Image (spheres, helix red, strand yellow):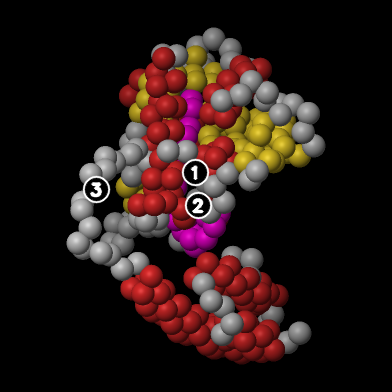
């Protein structure tokens, strides 16, 4: 199908969409990172200079048409939603006031619970600045200058402040801790991170990460790492029926590096971790700390360490059967109360 025909089909679909969520999902298919138009822009690299100029102009024209149509539809849907709320959610101001006490947000509950568990085991619970430098966020973590994570399409840079950004991971807290405390060290960090992602059911430009770092002068092996992962996953999901799988992966700051999966069975919208399930769920990344990370932190003695990290929202969504990450940040008190008492 020609691109103009795909655009026309996309515009026809837009006119039938009735919710913002549906609109975001459809827009991702056309303009998202893996969308139809994005793939066409990537294909420009294969063309000659003259062909690239003409094709690029046509793609930009299509992109502008699509973006304008999206904004118009979004504006229409927002206005429609406002009108619906004004009609459906009228308040009888003559009713007596009901005194209600607030609840802790479900994310706050889990953060506090995890912090208490680590503190009881003698870990330092640390956090650092959310506005970071490239050194702490990338350089010290052995992430090279050419790495795609350092590009503005993935990272929020601070305007007029070169090499300054909103941290994309809490691993930079590990760097600050190593510089301040050296080895041995046992620490975790739980905090907000920021990435240039479009908000949808499974992605958010702001989310929380849990990261753990253990460093010692005595040898630390993959066996120590696996045991620690078994313990934290069992604690988070409140079950001993945990079967983990480790897949080789690559992270610049660990070597060897592993993705961590757990065996599960889904029931009533929730994920039950079991040892006899037939499906595997990716949880996060882990590995033994790369020697370059220690050198970048000024640690020249022979030390060993492991680190692992997970997205907090993802774990909580799996644990409680929450299907949309946007629910965590919805100001509707009914939703917040429901999750707070989960």
The structure residue drawn at horizontal position 39% and vertical position 48%, both measured from the top left corner, is 336
Please rate how many residues cluster around mark 3, counting C-alpha atoms within 10 Å: few if below 14, some from 14 to 19, many from 20. few
Residue at label 2? 325
Q: Is residue 163 visible in this depiction of the protein?
A: no
The structure residue drawn at horizontal position 64% and vertical position 20%, both measured from the top left corner, is 240
Magenta region, residue range: 193-213
Q: Which mark is residue 14?
A: none
Residue 96 spot, x, y in % from top left: 20, 53
- Indicate left or right for 327 with 224 as reference: left
Residue at label 3? 98
Mark 3 and mark 2 in contact? Answer it, CB < 8 Å.
no
- Indicate left or right for 206 with 11 as reference: left
203 drawn magenta: yes
Residue 121 spot, x, y in % from top left: 45, 14
Q: CA distance from mark 3 to mark 1?
A: 32 Å
Looking at the rendering, which quadrant does residue 234 occupy?
top right
- Indicate left or right for 324 with 51 as reference: left
């Amino acid at each position: 199908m020609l691109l103009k025909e795909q655009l026309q089909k996309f515009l026809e679909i837009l006119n039938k969409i009735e919710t913002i969520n549906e609109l975001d999902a459809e827009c991702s298919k056309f303009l998202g990172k893996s969308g139809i138009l994005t793939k066409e822009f990537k294909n420009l690299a294969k063309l000659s200079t003259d062909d690239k100029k003409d094709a690029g102009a046509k793609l930009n024209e299509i992109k502008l048409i699509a973006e304008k149509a999206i904004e118009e539809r979004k504006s229409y849907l927002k206005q429609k939603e406002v009108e619906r709320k004004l009609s459906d959610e009228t308040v009888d101001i003559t009713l007596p006031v009901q005194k209600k006490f607030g609840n802790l947000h479900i994310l706050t509950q889990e953060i506090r619970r995890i912090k208490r568990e680590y503190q009881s085991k003698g870990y330092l619970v640390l956090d650092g600045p959310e506005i970071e430098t490239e050194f702490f966020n990338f350089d010290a973590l052995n992430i090279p200058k050419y790495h795609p994570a350092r590009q503005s399409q993935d990272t929020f840079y601070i305007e007029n402040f070169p090499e300054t950004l909103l941290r994309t991971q809490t691993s930079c807290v590990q760097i600050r801790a190593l510089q301040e405390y050296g080895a041995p060290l046992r620490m975790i960090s739980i905090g907000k991170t920021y990435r240039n992602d479009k908000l949808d059911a499974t992605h958010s430009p702001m989310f929380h990460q849990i990261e753990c770092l253990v460093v010692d002068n005595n040898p630390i092996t993959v066996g120590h790492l696996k045991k620690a992962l078994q313990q934290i996953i069992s604690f988070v999901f409140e079950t001993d029926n945990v079967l983990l799988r480790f897949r080789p992966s690559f992270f610049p700051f660990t070597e060897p590096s592993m993705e961590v999966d757990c065996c599960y069975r889904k029931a009533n919208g929730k994920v039950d971790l079991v040892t006899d399930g037939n499906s595997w769920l990716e949880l996060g990344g882990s590995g033994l700390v790369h020697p370059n990370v220690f050198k970048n932190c000024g640690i020249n003695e022979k030390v060993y360490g492991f680190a692992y990290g997970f997205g907090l929202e993802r774990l909580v969504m799996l644990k409680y059967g929450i299907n949309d990450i946007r629910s965590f940040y919805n100001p509707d008190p009914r939703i917040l109360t429901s999750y707070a008492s989960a």
